[in-house]
Amino acid sequence: SRLCHELNGWNARSCALAGSCSKSHLSVRSGIRCYQRFAERVLGHDGDELPPNIDELLAWSTLFRCSKTFSNYLNYVRLGGELVHVATGVFESPMLKHAKRSIEKKRKFVARDQ
């Protein structure tokens, strides 16, 4: 897919969008792959997972136990959309804030002792 090619290339535009910290690139790739697998296996997409619509993102949110992780992964998928030049306005939807609150209210996440 275009996204896989873009992530493997990490050209100047990609690096500028993803930030200068090379450590963040692995997290971005992981988050995007997570959504891609969900889109393929659950939603039936085949290389056309971007841009997601709000219903797809809300369905994806039900897999998360931590709203902060979901928020980070949303940002990674948004970045993926920016990398392949697709619309990313869906990430501004207030419904995603509701999804994050819903994750928090489930209280299924317990932080590890540091």
Image (cartoon, rainbow, N blue to C red):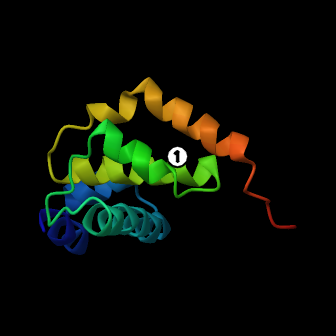
Decide: is 70 above or below 100: below
* Number of numbered markers: 1
In the image, residue 106 lies at what x, y percent? 70, 46
x and y, in percent, of residue 45 in the image: 19, 62
Q: Is residue 72 left or right of residue 65?
A: left
Q: Residue at x 38, y 45 (%)?
A: 57
- Which residue does the image show at 26% across and 46% down from the upper left? 52
Q: Is residue 85 above or below residue 43?
A: above
**Secondary structure under the numbered disc 1 in the rendered image:** helix
Camera-nearest residue between 13 and 36? 36
Please give left or right for residue 20 compared with residue 23 in the image.
left
Which residue lies under the disc numbered 1?
A: 71
Quarter of the image for the C terminus: give it.
Answer: bottom right
The amino acid on which the numbered mark 1 sits, given as a three-letter code, is Ser
Residue 86 percent location from the top left of the image: 16, 44
Compared across the picture, whether 47 is left or right of 21 comes to left
